[in-house]
Image (cartoon, rainbow, N blue to C red):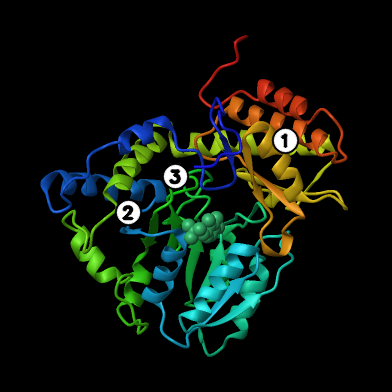
């Protein structure tokens, strides 16, 4: 296989916001012979992961797992709950919201995409107004992206739920938590989400290949009358088989071993501690960016996500040329700007299998790359991040002085 560097020593820094670095524990857990997916060993594994993953979604409701990317899980959420011609309200927070909207139209739904500037999250007031105006209750679902991975903007899901309730509207709430589930705070049950969609390769620290739907009671009820043709994605067969630890078709056995380990890791650390750890990374990165004199794409400080940072390139400088310099010199992949912001932003992923020194390596690579690529900036971003990290004590640790 051709490589940029024939003998790269040390690990590649995969600092795109997903797929993310897979920790050694998960790599080792997946290093298993494939087992009979109709045998007792598989059944025990399936029962364990189907129970554990609910804890990660913070739900007591069923979670189904497909061998698929996140896109498949998007489709599953729509085709199980809705019928052709149903109206769906979506919000253009960025690239992923736009793609989900396109998928919805392709499966026969009538969508309204509330326009956005790719720098802000979902405005709950706009949702409430649209639902209040829908006197005939023709809108059947509101679909929003929790962490918009193309922009780094995080939307307030409880506020969206409140807006739907305030309008007294029965629309379902479907949420894309593809990048955020397993890093940012996320509560499927407490936030009143009807379907949560995620994938394996971002905060869950697994390779790509698993798609998930967490299914609330109202979504299960809606599935009974949904008329959208479906077969592979149908929840009913999956749920019936899962009840006894089986899958209707061949599951991704190797990835499920990895998922079992990922759940163990997240639950051992504790979901609150995981979120606090990511907050440190987010805050340290924001301080570095401010010190460099660069600008975040996420315009509202309250919506700046802790798992990735999308940075606006100074005018006249190409983000992809900069990314190439970083890859070739430091063996680090940074995220590209997607569609509308291609070449205009680059993204730093700081999520998943990540600690203070992985962050510092990443920020040093960015700072050196800015210099080599001739991108105007001030020095001292990495230094500012270090100052923050050494004073803001890591969760679970005590200051040496105490
Ligand atoms: C990555 C991502 C997706 C798409 O998932 P695929 O696995 O690439 O199909 C959807 N939504 C968000 C927010 C994502 O980050």
**Element under disc 2:** loop
Residue 178: percent from left, percent from top: 50, 55
Q: Which residue is drawn at 30% across and 72% down?
A: 234
Residue 204 bears which disc, if any? 3
Q: Is residue 191 visible?
A: no
Residue 123: percent from left, percent from top: 67, 66
Q: Quadrant of residue 115?
A: bottom right
Residue annotated with mark 2? 60
Query: Label 3 to label 2, Cα distance in Å?
Result: 19 Å
Residue 287: percent from left, percent from top: 75, 35
Q: Can residue 233 be seen in this view?
A: yes
Q: Residue at x 56, y 81 (%)?
A: 111
94 horizontally vs 228: left or right: right
**Element under disc 3:** loop
The one of 225 and 18 positioned closer to us in this rendering: 18
Residue 366 bears which disc, if any? 1
């Amino acid at each position: 296989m051709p490589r940029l560097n024939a003998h790269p020593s040390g690990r590649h820094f995969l600092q795109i916001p997903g797929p993310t670095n897979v920790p050694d524990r998960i790599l080792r857990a997946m290093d298993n012979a494939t087992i009979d997916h109709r045998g007792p060993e598989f059944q025990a594994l399936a029962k364990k992961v189907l129970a554990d993953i609910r804890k990660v979604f913070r739900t007591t409701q069923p979670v189904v797992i497909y061998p698929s990317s996140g896109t498949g899980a998007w489709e599953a959420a729509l085709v199980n709950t809705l019928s052709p011609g149903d109206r769906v309200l979506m919000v253009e927070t960025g690239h992923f919201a736009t793609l989900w909207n396109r998928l919805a139209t392709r499966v026969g739904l009538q969508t309204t995409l509330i326009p956005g500037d790719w720098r802000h999250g979902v405005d709950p007031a706009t949702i409430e107004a649209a639902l209040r105006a829908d006197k005939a209750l023709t809108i059947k679902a509101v679909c929003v992206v929790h962490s918009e991975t193309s922009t780094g903007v995080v939307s307030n899901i409880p506020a969206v739920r409140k807006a739907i309730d305030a309008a007294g509207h029965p629309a379902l709430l479907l949420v894309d938590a593809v990048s955020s589930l397993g890093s940012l705070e996320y509560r499927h049950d407490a936030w009143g989400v009807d379907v949560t969609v995620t994938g394996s390769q971002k905060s869950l620290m697994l390779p790509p290949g698993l798609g998930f739907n967490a299914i609330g009671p109202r979504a299960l009820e809606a599935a009974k009358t949904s008329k959208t043709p479906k077969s592979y994605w149908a929840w009913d067969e999956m749920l019936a088989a899962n009840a006894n630890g089986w899958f209707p078709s061949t599951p991704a056995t190797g990835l499920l071993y990895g998922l079992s380990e990922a759940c163990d890791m997240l639950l051992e650390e504790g979901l609150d501690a995981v979120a606090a750890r990511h907050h440190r990374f987010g805050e340290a990165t924001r301080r570095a960016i401010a010190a460099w004199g660069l600008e975040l794409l996420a315009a509202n400080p309250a919506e700046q996500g802790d798992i990735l940072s999308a940075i606006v390139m100074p005018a006249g400088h190409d983000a992809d040329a900069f990314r190439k310099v970083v890859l070739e010199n430091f063996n680090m992949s940074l995220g590209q700007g997607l569609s509308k912001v291609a070449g205009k932003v680059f993204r730093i992923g700081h999520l998943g299998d990540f600690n203070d020194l992985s962050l510092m390596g990443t920020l040093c690579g960015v700072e050196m790359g800015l210099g080599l690529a001739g991108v105007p900036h001030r020095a001292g971003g990495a230094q500012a991040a270090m100052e923050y990290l050494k004073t803001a004590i890591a969760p679970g640790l005590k200051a040496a002085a105490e």
